[in-house]
Amino acid sequence: MNKTVYEIAKMDCASEENLIRMKLDGISEIKNLEFDIPNRMLTVYHEGQISLIEKSIIELNLGGKKIISEQTNQTEFAENTNQAKLLWAVLAINFAFFLIEITTGLISRSMGLVADSLDMLADSFVYGLSLFAVGGTLSRKKSIAKFAGYFQITLAIFGFVEVLRRFFGVEALPDFKTMIVVSVLALIANGICLYLLQQSKSKEEAHMKASMIFTSNDIIINLGVIAAGLLVNWLNSNKPDLVIGTIVFILVIQGARRILKIGT
């Protein structure tokens, strides 16, 4: 048995963990995967050559880099029977906030909230893929990943078009209070998701580390929308909302491209 440790520079939260799990699913040489999200490290326990594993990790474009590879006597790994239940919980939270944010975003005229709702939807896709695709055929997994990726890209493109329309047109200001309140609630929801996912780890890692929260893209986005809401009120302009919306739409497309990597 061999143990190979990778640094995954862009593994900011459990969403990237699930992308990696899906990408590596079906590689018979792999016996176990251990993720250290706060330190952005992945340990792969495997037999035989590492070439296919390494190729798959690089294809995800998450900044994967091999640190060390060595032999190990470890042959037994702890089973996590609660993983599916936890994935259902975080999927439900993310999808619920997708509905909340896209509804309030449209009502309050905030592209920041609409864009953040698509980011929540992207996470829902990742957790859904983990639940529905794992254990299924490889072709089924690829088909679901392609659908999810192209669907996200389509929604993000519509978002870009709307941002351009509002940038060059005369639009009413977004409701900055709604932006701030909903983003604070989404921030709490993301924190709950991260905490729940940490329950699948060993008892020593059961408590969520603060560094994990503050390095998460989702939480940075929430803070960005809050800041945009404050600037909308301060500057009496919709431009901060359009800027944060554009940034998040770009992040959504990047996430969709990662999902599409699974379908190739």
Image (tube, rainbow, N blue to C red):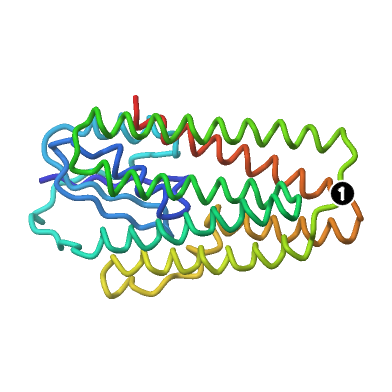
Say if 179 sits above or below 50 in the image.
Answer: below
**Position of 163 compared to 22: left or right?**
right
Q: x, y percentage for residue 73?
A: 8, 54
Which quarter shows the C terminus?
top left
**Position of 56 compared to 182: left or right?**
left
Q: Nearer the viewer, residue 212 or 2?
A: 212
Give the farthest residue toward the top: 264
Residue at image position (68%, 52%) is: 105
**Position of 262 compared to 63: left or right?**
left
Which amino acid, mark 1? Ala
Say which quarter of the image contains residue 235.
bottom right
**Position of 3 compared to 217: left or right?**
left
Residue at image position (73%, 35%) is: 162
Q: Nearer the viewer, residue 211 or 242?
A: 242
Say if 192 sits above or below 257 in the image.
Answer: below
Identify the secondary structure beneath mark 1: loop
Q: Which residue is mark 1?
A: 172
Q: Nearer the viewer, residue 48 or 232?
A: 232
Q: x, y percentage for residue 16?
A: 41, 47
